Amino acid sequence: MDGEPNFLSLFSRERNVVTLKPGETLFKKDDAAHYMYAVLSGNLRIGDGNIIYEEVSAGGIVGEMALVDHAPRSATVTATTDCTLAEIDEKRFLFLVQQTPMFALNLLRLLSHRLRQMNTLLKA
């Protein structure tokens, strides 16, 4: 999407990698959360039941809210294509926030973008 930050270069060398096939679920709404994920390749769908909130592709991230607020997952994320994801734990996340100001700023931009999208969906 236009204006959405791209995190691919920051996470392209991560060692903890998860792969998914089309239709596989990364996590479900209300699951406990310990990781966020950077999409290295493929496409994911964020949603709740039949409602699709967003499609995320390479360079995007999902699950970041859980590392910010420690609450259960707010949506279900499912692969729509073959996917490769970098799995980021809280320790790595906190390091990035502290040591990489552009990561923190881009994360805030992403959260703002998603909040605006949800406001638009609610008005529809």
Image (cartoon, rainbow, N blue to C red):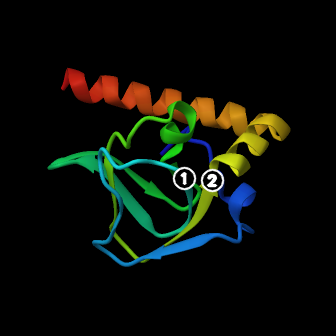
- Residue at the (64%, 47%) spot, across then down: 90
Q: Position of residue 18 (x, y in %)?
A: 53, 72
> In the visual, does 99 lie left or right of 76?
right
Question: Within 10 angstroms of label 2, few (less than 14), some, or many (20 or more) residues?
Answer: some
In the rendered view, would you say 57 is above or below 70?
A: below
Q: Which residue is mark 2?
A: 89
Q: Position of residue 97 (x, y in %)?
A: 74, 37
Element type at mark 1:
strand
**Residue type at numbered disc 1:** Tyr
In the rendered view, would you say 43 is above or below 36?
A: below
Name the outermost residue toward the left: 50
> In the visual, does 100 lie left or right of 43?
right
Q: Which residue is mark 1?
A: 35
**Residue nearest the viewer, comparing 117 with 10:** 10
Q: Position of residue 111 (x, y in %)?
A: 51, 32
Q: Are marks 1 and 2 in contact (CB under 8 Å)?
A: yes
- Residue at the (44%, 33%) spot, across then down: 114
**Residue nearest the viewer, comparing 25 with 91:** 91
- Residue at the (25%, 30%) spot, across then down: 121
**Residue nearest the viewer, comparing 77 with 44:** 77
Locate the C terminus by quadrant.
Answer: top left
